[in-house]
């Protein structure tokens, strides 16, 4: 079987996060077909904007950057996450239907259902104690975290009954290394957050499923839900 090559943009984390903001803004101004964008970046930690207000943020940021883990801030919520080799991000941007009540649970479902279906047996959604950025809309595989999710939404400029939605998933193609887990723990510790992040709470793709096959299956599952979906290349 010849697999389709799914484009995955590789760019600095700051540019990728800015691109997400641009995609959401563009959809809110001129709603069109839903968009799907895959991207990856170099080794870094990404945290929500709210972390800037923590008293020890400057010290923690300097410490981790000195260890080779630059800190980037994102507009979505959540917690600290690692980026770098073995991580592929998927960003889903779309506008809701006119007059439809906005549901956070449904918006997360529109993101997680295709991932669960592409992973196959053993995949599910829910909390994963010991995982970084743990949340109710994690995607798990065989009892371990495979993907973390976050979201932003806003009313359309032209129709306040509709919303522009940006839903994001960080997918662990490879299980995180002890170094990555240590960086997350170290950053939280420097911020005064006493939390244990366990490496065994996470997983990558199973050996039977290659990165290429998984991404192709994932795009296919998104298109089952929305055949008009546009796949972005940059």
Image: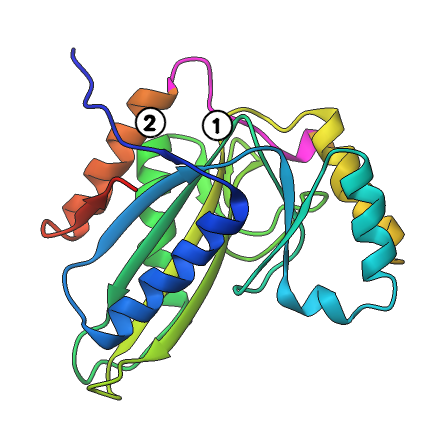
* Real-space CA distance between mark 1 and mark 2, rounded to the nearest whole angstrom: 9 Å
Question: Is residue 3 rendered to the left or right of residue 65?
Answer: left
Give the magenta range. 200-210
Above or below residue 21? Residue 190 is above
Residue found at x 30% / y 72%: 164
| Residue 81 x/y as whole percent | 63, 46
Residue 224 percent coordinates (x, y) = 15, 45
**In this figure, which residue is indicated by the disc labeled 1?**
173
Counting residues from the N terminus, which is met first, the one under dot 1 or under dot 2? Answer: 1
Place residue 65 in its image quadrant.
top right
Residue 149 falls left or right of residue 64: left
Q: Is residue 132 left or right of residue 100?
A: right
Q: Secondary structure at mark 1?
A: loop
Task: Give the structural element (helix, strand or loop) at label 2.
Answer: helix
- Does residue 185 appear anywhere in the picture? yes
Judging by the rendered image, the residue that carries numbered circle 2 is 214
Front residue of 183 and 120: 183
């Amino acid at each position: 079987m010849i697999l389709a090559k799914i484009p995955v943009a590789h760019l600095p984390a700051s540019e990728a996060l800015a691109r997400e903001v641009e995609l959401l803004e563009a959809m809110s101004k001129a709603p069109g077909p839903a968009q799907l964008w895959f991207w990856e970046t170099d080794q870094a930690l990404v945290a929500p904007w709210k972390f800037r207000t923590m008293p020890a943020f400057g010290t923690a940021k300097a410490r981790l950057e000195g260890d080779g883990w630059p800190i980037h801030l994102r507009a979505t919520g959540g917690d600290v996450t690692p980026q770098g080799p073995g991580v592929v991000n998927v960003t889903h941007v779309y506008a809701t239907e006119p007059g439809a009540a906005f549901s956070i649970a449904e918006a997360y479902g529109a993101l997680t259902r295709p991932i669960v279906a592409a992973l196959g047996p053993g995949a599910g959604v829910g909390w994963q104690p010991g995982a970084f950025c743990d949340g109710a809309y994690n995607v798990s595989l065989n009892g371990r975290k495979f993907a973390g999710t976050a979201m932003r939404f806003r009313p359309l400029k032209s129709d306040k009954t509709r919303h522009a939605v940006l839903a994001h998933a960080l997918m662990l193609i490879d299980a995180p290394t002890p170094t990555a887990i240590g960086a997350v723990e170290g950053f939280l510790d420097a911020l005064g957050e006493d939390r244990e992040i366990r490496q065994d709470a996470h997983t990558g793709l199973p050996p039977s499923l290659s990165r290429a096959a998984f991404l192709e299956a994932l795009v296919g599952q998104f298109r089952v839900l929305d055949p008009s979906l546009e796949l972005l290349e940059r």
